[in-house]
Amino acid sequence: MEMIYDDVNSANNKSSRCMGNQVTSSKRTKVLLIVLGVSLVLALGGLCVLGFMYISVSVKLSAQQTNGTTMARELEELTANYTNYREKFDALHNQHEETLRKLNRLNRMSSDLSLVQTSTGCALCAVNWIYSGGKCYYFSTVKMNWTQSRDHCVSRGGHLVIINSQAEQDFLSSKVKVTHWIGLNDLDTEGHWVWVNNQPLNDSAEFWMKREDGVSEPDNWTEGHPAGEDCASLGHPGGDTEIWMDAFCFQEKRFVCEAAAAV
Ligand SMILES: [Ca+2]
Ligand SMILES: [Ca+2]
C-alpha cells in the first residue's frame, strides 16, 4: 500500500514538473511571438519609410528630368534666337559700314566742290577750279610734258583746255603769268591742228603769235628736234600770255584743264 502511495506521489511529482515545463514553454512562445510581432511591425514601418523615400526621390528625379528637358528646349530656342539675331546684327553691321562708306564718299565729293554764284544762278566747280562762262578751269602748279598734262586733266575729270572764243582767250590770258599747255596739237598731221576733242581749229578763234617779219606761229621749229613742234601753248616763254605758240611736246610746262560746271 505504501509502495502504491509512493508511486502515486512520484507520478504526481512528475506530472507537476511536466506542467511546470509546459507553462514555461508557453511563456517563451508568447515572448517569441511578441518579439516576432514587434519585429514585423518595425520591418513593416521600415518598408513604409523606404517606400516613401523611394516615391519622394522618384518624384524629385522626375521633376528634375522635366526641368532638364524644359531647360534643354529653352537653350535650343535661345541658341536659335542667338543665331537669328547674330545674322541680323551682321547684316545691319554690313549696312552700317556701307552707309559710312557712302557718307565718306559724299563728304569727300562735297568737300571737293565749291559753289559759285553766277549771273543765272549757282554753279559747282571742284575745289581749286575757277568758274568762268559756264566752265571750270584748273591752272596747274606743277609742270608736265604735253601728253602727261593731257592725261592729268582727264584724271581730274576734265581735259586740256579748248579755247573757243576771244572771251575765253582773254579770261585765260588774265589768269596766267607764264606759258601753259592747251589742248591743241598737230601730232597726227603736220600743220593740221586739232583740239583734244578731235575738233579742228576754228580759224575765227585762233590766237597764234604774229611776228612782223612774217615768221609767225606755228612755225614748227626743228632746231635740236627734227620732228618739230606739235603741241600748242598759251603764252610766250618770255612772258607774253596773250598769244599761242607751238612748242616741243616733250617740254615741261604748266597746263590749263577745263571741265563743264555743274548747275
Ligand atoms: Ca607741228
Ligand atoms: Ca613755235
Image (cartoon, rainbow, N blue to C red):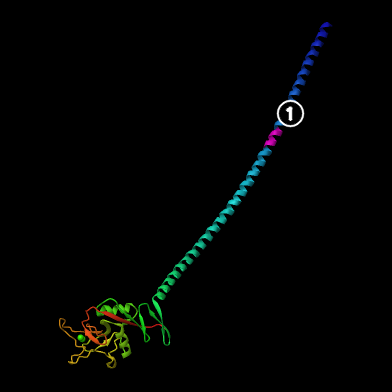
Q: Which residue is drawn at 59% across and 54% down?
A: 70
Q: Which amino acid does label 1 sit on?
A: Ile
Is 45 in the magenta? yes
In this view of the protein, can residue 21 be seen by the observer?
yes
* Looking at the image, residue 6 lies above or below residue 245: above
Predominant SS of the magenta segment: helix
Q: Residue at x 67, y 36 (%)?
A: 46
Image coordinates of residue 219 in percent, x first then y, are: 19, 88
- 32 with respect to 231 (left or right): right
* Looking at the image, residue 99 lies above or below residue 32: below
Q: Residue at x 30, y 81 (%)?
A: 256
Image coordinates of residue 145 in percent, x first then y, are: 24, 78
Image coordinates of residue 5 in percent, x first then y, are: 83, 8
Read off the residue under disc 1: 34
Give SS at disc 1.
Answer: helix
- 39 with respect to 174 (left or right): right
Looking at the rendered image, the quarter that the N terminus falls into is top right
Give, as a single range, the part of the protein colored magenta: 40-46
